[in-house]
Amino acid sequence: MKVTVLGANSAFSVGDFKDAVPVDKLQAMVPELTKKIGKSGWSTRKISNYLKSYFEEHKENLYSSAWQSNFLIEFDQRNIRGDKDSPFRLVLDFGSDVRHALASQGLDFKDIDAYYVSHPHDDHIGGVEGIALKTFFNPFFTRKKSNWLGGENIIDKITYKAARGQLYKVPKDAKPIMYGHRDILEALWKAAEPGLLTLQQVREVSLETYFNPMQMVENEPLTFKDKKRTWRAYIVLSMHVVSGDSTMPSYGLMFETEDTIVFFPTDTQFMVPPQLRGHYMKSDYIFHDTETSPFPSGVHTRLEELKTLPEDLKKKMILYHYDSTVVPDVEEGEFCDVAFSGSTYEF
Ligand SMILES: [Zn+2]
């Protein structure tokens, strides 16, 4: 099981607009660069060093990526896309900028077999409409999908060709899987519905039109195969937001195999519910929500709180979901690791 941290930052961290390179500034850089490099007769190495220092100097104009929080989890089992050369790819949460997060790993929606959604905040589900529409209208998303379409447009296939009174549904193996707790999948559809409900000519559009929804239930794990091992993924409740009489749980995932347990509690308040302690104790690695913003939200675990944990628990924790401008200030060896966009872990 390979985990790649696509994004390690909190909700508001998608790279500030002011950080982007404005086209006019880029244009202004070009003549200067051309002049220096074009007639210089410099070696490739010298050009490369020059560019490095040039961009270092102008880095206030460069876009700094901060792709919220999302993970790519890969298993070497067969994928649903029918591509023998790539692993089964599961994306855990897909914030508003997940296409950029995926692009940073050279991937696109067409490369992803399954998604898991922990809770319905924008930085975890914001990208759903883009994922749904881009994969729905991609006739090559899976090999089985292209065969099923047989060169026809998907809209024609599911409307005009439908038997009278019957809907011609998109087959399961032509869509990405959407895993999640029942309540969260409902909330996901509620959030996505305004944009996804209407498809020209198509009746009865639902989450199932775009995804193969797989409702997860406590104590009934998903199973994944990797390097001859079986990983079971259990859904685990953590409490993210309590507002008057309403609550927003976040459902984490606990991956278990014979000798290793990897836990993603996802967004959670510190030790809410208190049973999290038991989960922490049994886990070997914990990817943990770590709020570092100077303005406490009350709905995330703060770095100061994590620091109060016993040493053996801290040493299992890989910190993420921190403010992009405030990287967790930890002592060497205090925690297992601080994750950055692009960090990878093999279990
Ligand atoms: Zn959240």
Image (tube, rainbow, N blue to C red):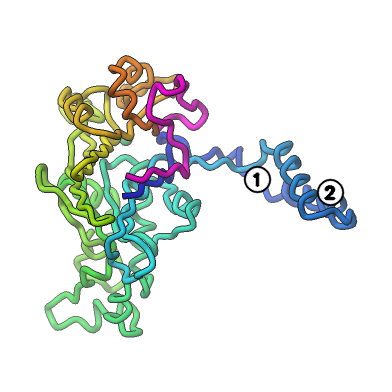
Q: Which mark is residue 272?
A: none
Q: Mark 2 points at which residue?
A: 32
Front in this rendered view, residue 232 or 103: 232
- Rendered location of residue 120, percent (x, y): 28, 42
Q: How crowded is mark 1: few (under 14 residues within 10 Å), some or many (20 or more)?
A: some
At a point 34% along the width and 61% down the height, the residue shown is: 87
Q: Mark 1 points at which residue?
A: 21
Q: Which of marks 2 and 1 is in front?
A: 2
Q: In this view, does 246 lie above or below 179?
A: above
Q: In this view, does 86 lie above or below 125?
A: below
- Rendered location of residue 157, percent (x, y): 27, 80
Question: Contact (CB < 8 A) between labels 2 and 1?
Answer: no
At a point 43% along the width and 35% down the height, the residue shown is: 339
Q: How crowded is mark 2: few (under 14 residues within 10 Å), some or many (20 or more)?
A: few
Picture quarter with the C terminus: top left
Residue range of the region highlighted in magenta in the rendering: 321-347
The quadrant of the picture showing ligand 1 is top left
Front in this rendered view, residue 3 or 91: 3
Dominant secondary structure of the magenta stretch? loop
Front in this rendered view, residue 51 or 159: 51
Residue type at tag 1:
Val
Residue 57 highlighted magenta (yes or no): no
Residue type at tag 2:
Glu
Q: How many labels does the image show?
A: 2
Q: How far apart are marks 2 and 1 (CA)?
A: 16 Å
At a point 88% along the width and 56% down the height, the residue shown is: 41
Question: Outermost residue toward the top?
Answer: 308
